[in-house]
Image (tube, grey):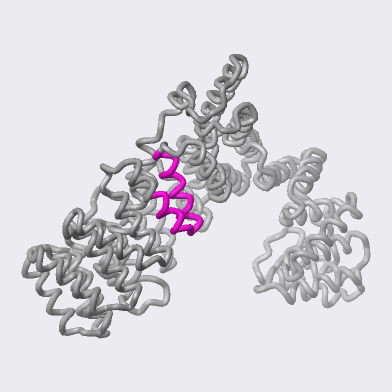
Amino acid sequence: MISRERLVRFFVIIGCLVAVFSCKVAKTAIPSSQASISRDSSEVKLSEDNRKEFEYLYIEGLKQKTLGNFDDAIKLFSRCLEIDSRSSATLYEMATIHVSKGDFQSSMFLLEKAVLNNPENQYYRLLLIKVYQQNKLFEKAAQEYEALSRLVPDNPDYPFYQATLLGMSGKLAEAMSLYNRLEQQKGFSESIALGRQQLYLQQENRVAAYTEIEKLIQHNPSVSKYYGLLADMYLTDNNLDKALENYNKIISIDPNDGFVHLSMADYYLQLKDSAQAYEHIILAFKNVELDFETKAQMYYLMSKPGSTKISDQQQLELLHILIDTHVNDERPRAFLVDYYQGVKKPDEARKQIRLVIEMNKENYQYWERLLLLNNDLQDWSSMVDDSNKALAYFVDQPLVYILKSVGLLQQKRYTDLLSVIDSASVHVKNDPKILSQLYTYRAEAFYNLKRYVEAYDVFDKVVELDPENYMAMNNYAYYLSIKGERLAVAEKLSAKVIQANPDNSTYLDTYAWVFFMKKDFQLARFYMETALSKSTDDNAVLIEHYGDILYYLNEKDNALIQWKKSLEKGNISKTLKLKIAQKRYLETKEN
């Protein structure tokens, strides 16, 4: 349920904190060059040589950090700390790298040292607060805001953030006392009332929570959102008449309030009146003043898998309303892509994602979805063309190279494929699994170009890079088997694949074929029959192979039956037709 109460709570409490943690730190952080020239007073006095070395290493560290070479930057900053272990600026820079990597434990340790060495720097404390919150150390974060309030007494926000964090840490009495002191100092305000309301809700003192909102209404009777907060509380408490009364009050004050229609949709959903709820959702979605993010929340609530709140047709109607009311935002149309994929209409989904990309060519996720839709539709020409367009914007994205390689492989453009993989290898650097995938396609290209020695060498490299690339191992084993080469290697590879994928009929077929080529026809039969039992459909190639095995087990009549069955299942092999005509096994000739 999307309620005004929860939305306001999000924006007032969480929103203000995020603003401080991200925007303020980013915008007001000490410029790095200044930090390197004007070192903290707490740092040790260095000799001239050490000072010069320190500044050189520090500037190089900043340069590597700017270039995104975080590991190199950390090494340089670590050498700075070897020269001056109390350098708060260095500790701070290292901490920001760890924050960007999501390592909040290491960043906390570094920032605590930076603050200890330089307690007057509010920016170090602000980042430390962010890290404390990520580590759910809300009381420590509150203590930092208390320190900031003393450092920057003219900042009116810090005490409010402190009170919020005290509440989040469970220090409800301390938080309430702080709100009360703030009211004595600054007078009654919305922030104080909403803060206290949240504390009362945590204490399950709903009477007092109602009182705080009613006081807000008394001070500002023309502000519609306060009636929304009151209505949402009544709705939560199942007092539907009072909830409706306050929702109607909002409409009388501001008929164009989009939020109230979402709230009333919640109201009617609680009454299990989907028709009335949908009418209010329509009104909310048509409201151009209501932000897209809020509408998106309601859309997800109404359309999530398993939901019976709206039909597919209503879902489609809502999406078109979103597109019409947010004409310069590609996200509603991206939702339409989701819809068409959900109802199994990949052609329509692809049409829409192309329009989305026209609106925003800089979003990699949109290109990736287009390429994957091409893959689903097996449109290899479009796969290659769209990959080329994507690479103009995202030259370092490995999946684009992989999908382009798939398209070229399917089009049998093997020479072009080799060229693409050479280019891709430069950009994907040293990721073994990605290189293994790309080299798999290189090996396939060499094999199809009849450059067998080169193909086998690359397959060996693939297996070395990624010992779990079972598709490549299976294909390698199969190619060796059909050429009757290195059958011991083929058996070893295929056995490993089967051990990891015992129910895969294609892999079982390869294993059976290795034994066939080794003339171990009984084992070949066992694994081929296992493959057929695991196959989800009547695979024509597996059936042909089964007939080949039976032929060498002197079950020639049964072999002929299997070959004819394979032909009926769509096998268009010329060799198969000759087998049937001549009633004997013939080796398949490569093109």
Question: Would residue 142 be counted in the magenta stretch?
Answer: yes
Q: Residue at x 85, y 64 (%)?
A: 585
State the residue at coordinates (48%, 55%).
Answer: 134
Total numbered labels placed on residues in the image: 0
Q: Is residue 319 visible?
A: no
- Of the pair 408 and 4, the residue shown nearer to us: 4
Residue 136 appearing in the image: yes
What range is drawn magenta here? 122-145
**Residue 371 in picture, x, y percent from top left:** 49, 50
Q: Quadrant of residue 155?
A: top left
Q: Is residue 157 magenta?
A: no
Q: Which quadrant: the N terminus?
A: bottom left
Q: Nearer the viewer, residue 500 or 231?
A: 231
Q: Is residue 46 left or right of residue 566?
A: left
Q: Is residue 207 left or right of residue 100?
A: left
Reply above or below: 424 against 33: below
Residue 550 lies left or right of residue 225; in this view the side is right
When asked about the image quadrant of residue 237, the answer is bottom left
Relative depth, front residue between 469 and 167: 167
Residue at 19 percent across and 60 percent down: it is 190
Q: Quadrant of residue 284?
A: bottom left
Majority SS type along the magenta span: helix
Query: Residue 350 at what x, y percent from top left?
Result: 41, 54
Relative vertical location of residue 538 with respect to residue 370 in this rendering, above or below? below
Residue extending farthest to the top is: 48
What's the residue at 65%, 73% (across, down)? Answer: 537
Judge by depth and name the residue closer to the eye, 97 or 289: 97
Query: x%, y% of residue 443?
Result: 73, 43
